[in-house]
Image (tube, helix red, strand yellow):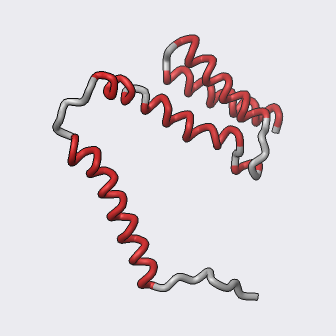
Amino acid sequence: MTEIGTEIGTGALWTVIIGLGAGSFLLRFSFLGLIGDRDLPAWVLRHLRYTGVAVIPALVAPLVVWPAATDGALDAPRLMAALVTVAVGLAFRNVIAAILAGGASLYLGLYLLG
């Protein structure tokens, strides 16, 4: 049985690639090219400091809540590792300690709980 509509032509593929490239360039140029050499207000700079703090949990949360290893089912070892990572990070204010504690907790949890 063949699937209908799953193939894409070469012209359409290049159109999508070029369109995505142009869109990506324009999005970055709007920030870096137009306002990159100007002084930003203090409130903008204060908010930009928290970008990394906001992005990393957004990247990690789907891996904890809907892990691909369990076909999207929530499991105890990953949830426990995330909680240990947050707790160690808050307690010691040390990123390396938090990462190592979370990794150790994940491997220990997977070893003990399967």
Position of 76 with respect to 38 (left or right) is right
Q: Residue furthest left?
A: 37
Nearest to the observer: residue 97 or residue 72:
72
Image quarter (top left, top right, bottom left or bottom right) of the C terminus? top right
Q: Residue at x 49, y 17 (%)?
A: 94
Q: Is residue 6 left or right of residue 71?
A: left
Of all residues, the one furthest to the bottom in this rendering is: 1
Front residue of 75/5: it is: 5
Residue 25 spot, x, y in % from top left: 30, 57
> Quick one: 65 or 77, which is closer to the camera?
65
Whole-percent x, y for residue 109 in the image: 75, 31
Residue 66 in the image: x percent, y percent? Answer: 71, 45
Residue most extreme to the right: 113
Indicate the quadrant where residue 16 lies: bottom left
Return the x and y of residue 42 as percentages of the image width and height: 28, 22
Q: Is residue 70 above or below residue 60?
A: below
Count of numbered labels shown in the rendering:
0
Q: Quadrant of residue 45?
A: top left
At 58% from the left and 11% from the top, the residue drawn is 91
Where residue 62 sits, quadrant-wise, is top right
Q: Quadrant of the N terminus?
A: bottom right
Q: Is residue 22 above or below residue 68?
A: below
Q: Residue at x 16, y 38 (%)?
A: 37
